[in-house]
Image (spheres, rainbow, N blue to C red):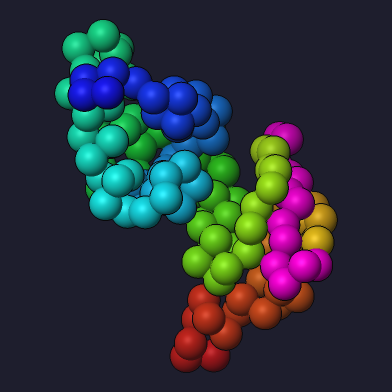
Amino acid sequence: MKGQLTKRDITLIEHCRKHLPITSDMAAILFYPNRYIAQRRLNTIHQLRQLKRTERIVVNQPYIYYLDKRDIRHLPFTKLLYDLRQNEYDISEYDFDGRTLTAIIHKDELSYKINSTIQNIEQVYKRLSLIAKKNPSQ
């Protein structure tokens, strides 16, 4: 499918429009099986002429992008999702609703529902035992 968008590519672009900012590493964790494939697909997406300039900027890597400054408020939540995937949690669904992240995650045949705000995001890290892995110096 050289030069054409796959379903994952379209999903990534739609996600970027709603939940920016995002890095290429996060895109790999959320949408592609590994970093190598993500890197290739992001390059392909960026080079397609049919995309608008803002869409090409969104998927250019390895930087963090946003279309609107208001989208920056999702960064702590996007980072939390990234940390969850890095710590072998499966994310079955998630949604940003205003200033809240709602997600359903799975690990070792157990399911958890997360309702996180900016104020309680550190508690989520502690409850899921990610704090030691996130900040090894603590």
Residue positioned most to the front: 1
Is 60 included in the stretch rendered in magenta?
no
Identify the main secondary structure in magenta. Answer: strand
Residue 122 locus on image (x, y percent): 67, 69
User: In the image, is residue 33 above or below residue 88?
Assistant: above
Q: Give the camera-side residue of 1 and 124.
A: 1
What span is in magenta? 97-110
In the image, residue 1 above or below residue 70? above
On the picture, is 103 further left or further right than 24?
Answer: right
Is 102 within the magenta?
Answer: yes
Displayed quadrant of residue 54: top left
Q: Residue visible at 21% across and 20% down?
A: 3
- The answer to whether residue 18 is seen in the rendering is yes
Residue 63 appears in view:
no
Which quadrant of the structure image shows residue 96?
A: top right
Identify the residue at image location x=30%, y=46%: 37
Q: Position of residue 72 (x, y in %)?
A: 49, 40
How many marks the image carries: the answer is 0
In the image, 117: left or right of 135? right
- Image quadrant where one finds the N terminus: top left
Which is nearer the eye, 55 or 38? Answer: 38
Residue 82 left/right relative to 34: right
Q: Which residue is at a point 54% across and 90% down the rendered structure image?
A: 138
Q: Position of residue 76 (x, y in %)?
A: 56, 54
Which residue appears farthest toward the top when viewing the image? 50
Residue at the (22%, 29%) spot, across then down? 44
91 up-or-down from 56: above or below = below
Residue 127 x, y percent position in the rendering: 75, 75
